[in-house]
Amino acid sequence: MAEAVVASVLEEALRQASERIAKKITEGKKLTSIDVIILLLDQINKRIDDTNKRIDDTNRRIDDLNTSLNRRIDDLSASLNKRIDDTNKRIDDMNRKIDDLKEEVKLLRQEVSSIKSDIINLSKERLTGTGGP
């Protein structure tokens, strides 16, 4: 805070000194070396102020771009997460179907094995001539 007060006091002093020097110039009086230095300091101060304003504007633009970019990244992340969740759901559904098919194949194997045993038993009975027409 002290820096701000000192800076504003110095700015005001430069402004007043520059006004006095400008009055000297309009009256046609000769400028001293100090007068020239004060005018140079005033110009340097104005250029520094202009540069600071440009830096502030640039920082605001960077902040705006950063905010926009973060928003786009968040949107993209949400979109990708949704797609991944959808894909995971499809994978889970597919895994359930595979498990169902495995169970069905297991039951079919048991049934085929039972039929195979029945055929073997029937074939044995026919060969041995027991039980049957």
Image (cartoon, grey):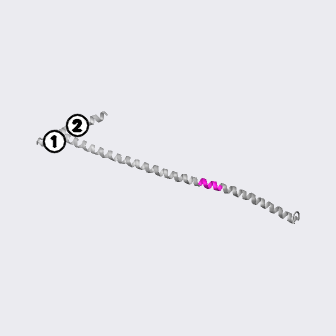
**What quarter of the picture does the C terminus occupy?**
bottom right
Distance (Cα) linking label 1 and label 2 = 15 Å
- Tag 1 secondary structure: helix
> Does residue 59 appear to the left or right of 122 in the view shown?
left
**Foreground residue, 104 or 25?**
104
- Residue type at the position of mark 1: Ala
For image coordinates 68% across by 56% down, the residue present is 102
In the rendered view, tell whether residue 70 sits above or below residue 16.
below
Q: Residue 116: x and y, percent?
A: 78, 61
In the rendered view, tell whether residue 89 sits above or below residue 120.
above
For image coordinates 75% across by 59% down, the residue present is 111
Is tag 1's residue or tag 2's residue first in the polypeptide sequence?
A: 2
* Residue 59 is covered by the magenta coloring: no
Identify residue for label 1.
22
- Tell me the number on the disc at residue 12: 2
Q: Residue 31: x and y, percent?
A: 14, 41
Q: Which residues are magenta?
A: 91-98
For image coordinates 56% across by 54% down, the residue present is 87
